[in-house]
Amino acid sequence: MSLPGGPVPVDAARRWVGDATSRLLGETIGMSDAELREPSLLPGWSRAHVVTHIARGADRLRHVATNPEAGLGSPTDADERFEALERGADRPGIELQLDLDTSASDMHRSWNEVADWETPIQIFDKPCSLAMLPIIRLHEVCIHHLDLRTTGCDPDSIDPDASIWLLRWVLSKMVYPAGRAMTVTATSGTTATIGSGRVSRNVSGTDAHLWAWLSGRADATFVDGARGLAFDPLA
């Protein structure tokens, strides 16, 4: 797995992750237990579910950083992960906040020990390097901050340089119906064709708006040329 635009700027990406995490922690720390039980944008998930999911995501990326040979595979036991998510979401707000903060700090400490960010790993059974981890985490923190339905995060609040890499990451994961194709053009100059066959859509917009729309967190009015087309929420 590789992204267009050359090598991932690891130092910048880590700074973007740190800034995004600080904004997330700053908002969740003020949430009451009742507010954490309110619905998120993800069907069937409360805000507490989202917070728990973000914390476990940090654990997974920490594990990859310390055990590159293990890689980051697709979840294999959906029932077990669902049960763990349910247990985690049932905790008091102070425990959820501590988990979110501690897991992020532990992940960052493990990244400080990485000697070579070009160490090869497998991400969802595709080859890449450890340098992809900060981009994955950036997407995870930003997209799930949107899911929390707060005022502290919207696509326009994301660093423009960070949004370029967020869009590139999402484009690498997109699947479009067979026999059809869609071109995507961002204001940064990033272009891509999703799918194969006849191009039926030409969609354009800012990197952040395209990222949010392709991730299922914004409607078609956010971008040009996407009328009537929506995507399911992307993890």
Image (tube, rainbow, N blue to C red):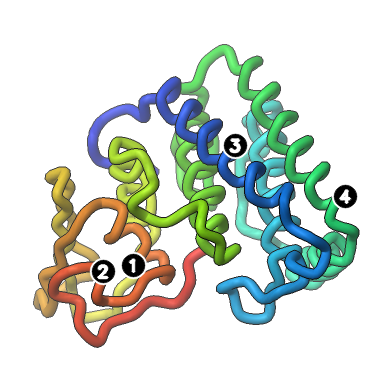
Residue type highlighted by circle 4: Glu
Is residue 77 shown to the viewer in this render?
A: no
Mark 3, residue position: 22
Q: In the image, is 212 to the left or to the right of 209? A: right
Mark 1, residue position: 213
* Element at label 3: helix
Q: Which mark is residue 94?
A: none
Q: Earlier in the sequence, mark 1 or mark 4?
A: 4
Q: Residue at x 57, y 12 (%)?
A: 115
Residue type highlighted by circle 2: Phe
Mark 4, residue position: 95
Q: Earlier in the sequence, mark 3 or mark 4?
A: 3
Asked if residue 170 is positioned above or below residue 200 in the image, the reply reads: above
Based on the displayed image, in which of its 4 quarters is residue 100 positioned? top right
Q: Characterize the local packing of mark 1: few (<14), some (14-19) or many (20 or more) Cα atoms within 10 angstroms.
A: many
Residue type highlighted by circle 3: Ser
Is residue 47 shown to the viewer in this render?
A: yes
